[in-house]
Each structure stands twice: as C-alpha cells, then as structure tokens.
Image: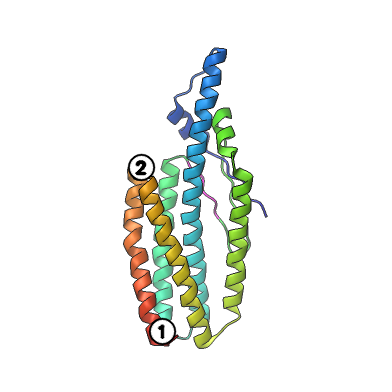
Amino acid sequence: MRMRRLLWGAGLLALMGMGAGCAHDEAKQARSRGERIGEAFAEKVRYTDQLSLLNQEQIALGHLALMKSSHPEVKAFAQDLIRNHQNSQQDLLTLAQSKAMSLAAVDLSTQDQAIGGAGAEGVMQGMEQGEEKYDKKFDKQVNQFLEKRNELAGLSGRDFDKAFLEQVKEDQERGAELIDQGLEKYRDDTALALLLSRTSPVIQAHQQRIATLRGFIGD
C-alpha cells in the first residue's frame, strides 16, 4: 500500500510568483526558491495529514464502540468522539482547500487512499524530498491502526470498553502533542493556528471524559 502526495498547482504558483522566460541564472534561482517553498509546503501538508489521520482513526473507533460497547456512557462518548472529529476533519479539509493542499483520505475499512494534483518543477522537487520515507511511515501508521482496531473488534463487554478507552486515551495524547507542535511551528499561519486553538480544548475535554469513564468502569 503506497500513498503518493501530490499538489494542486494553482495555489503554489500564486505563492511563488514565478514567471516565464527567465534567463539561465534566474531560472536556476527560481528552481532553488521553488525547492525551498516545496519543502516547506510538503512539511505543512504532512503535518496536516497527521491531524487528518487522527480524526479518521477516532471516527472509526467511535463507530466500532457504538457496535461493540454495552455501556451507555461509553456509547455516548463514542457519539461525541465521532461528531467532534468529523467537525474537526471538515474544518481541516476546508483549510486545506483554501491553501491548495490535498490531504490523504484513508478509508480505514478498505485502505484506499486519495491522490492530489500537480505543481511546478522546482516545487515538486522540493515536495518530493523525503516523500518515499514519509509514504512508508504513513502506510505503517495505517497498518498499525488496523491491527489495533481488529484487536478491539475481537473483544466484548467490559474488556472492550477498557481497551477502547485506553486506545482513545493514547490517541488523544498524540493529538495534544500534534497540536502543541503545530501551535509552536505554525503560529504565523493565522488560519491553521486558529483551527488548532479551537481543537485543543476539544482534545482536553476528551481526555477528561476518558478519565471519568475509566473510573466508572474500573481499571
């Protein structure tokens, strides 16, 4: 399974302000500038990919809990988990579209993946730096999630509830770390920083609720 990350070209060309008919030195400088822009853009795309994957994982786990859990409070939490991460995902997709980014969309039941568009030569060279390594990492993350989901699907009753809450707890901690990283690194990106600032209290609320539910169920 391989995820190819490509770009929508229009937004990047506007960002770069590159023109046609450059002399040799100017063209070389333009390619170099494009590579730097492509590398920075790729890094941001991959960061938002991680947020997107987290959302999709939590939605999938929430649906599993609705099917497997017999605890009404766990089911209620699962519904909220689904709704909150669906809202977060929609906000993320809207943001990505406004920035000419194409995020990886993974169907965690079929493992199908989405593919984006195209960009300029220098930008694509910068974008492709580290792409193969990232693809492997992304695929590994998806496979690891599928293994965990399948393990959860084999449980029932209190065993399922405990394992479900523990998994979501780990995932929400990862989400909190991602948000902190993004707020630090992309604080100059107003739109992304605002999205992360809205998401942070939701993650915190999930963590608090998990702690309460684990108290109900018992460790």
Choose between 28 and 197: the one closer to the eye: 28
Magenta stretch: includes residue 104: yes
Sequence-earlier tag: 1 or 2 = 1
- Across and down, in percent, residue 156 comes to 55, 85
Please say if 207 is above or below 101.
Answer: below
Q: Amino acid at mark 2?
A: Asp
Q: Main secondary structure of the magenta part?
A: loop
- Across and down, in percent, residue 217 comes to 42, 86
The residue located at (48%, 49%) in the rendering is 47
Specify the label residue 189 is tagged with: 2
Choose between 184 and 139: the one closer to the eye: 184
Specify the label residue 80 is tagged with: none
Mark 1 falls on what kind of element? helix
101 displayed left or right of 125: left
Residues packed near mark 2 inside 10 Å, few (<14), some (14 to 19) or many (20 plus): few
Please say if 81 is above or below 13.
Answer: below
80 displayed left or right of 116: left
Please say if 180 is above or below 185.
Answer: below
Magenta stretch: includes residue 93: no
Residues packed near mark 1 inside 10 Å, few (<14), some (14 to 19) or many (20 plus): few
- Across and down, in percent, residue 1 comes to 68, 55
Residue matched to label 1: 72
Quarter of the rendering occupied by the C terminus: bottom left
The magenta span reads 101-105
The nearer-to-camera label among 1 and 2 is 2
The answer to whether residue 109 is seen in the rendering is no
The answer to whether residue 79 is seen in the rendering is yes
Label 1 to label 2: alpha-carbon separation: 41 Å
The residue located at (34%, 45%) in the rendering is 187
Mark 2 falls on what kind of element? loop
Q: Amino acid at mark 1?
A: Pro
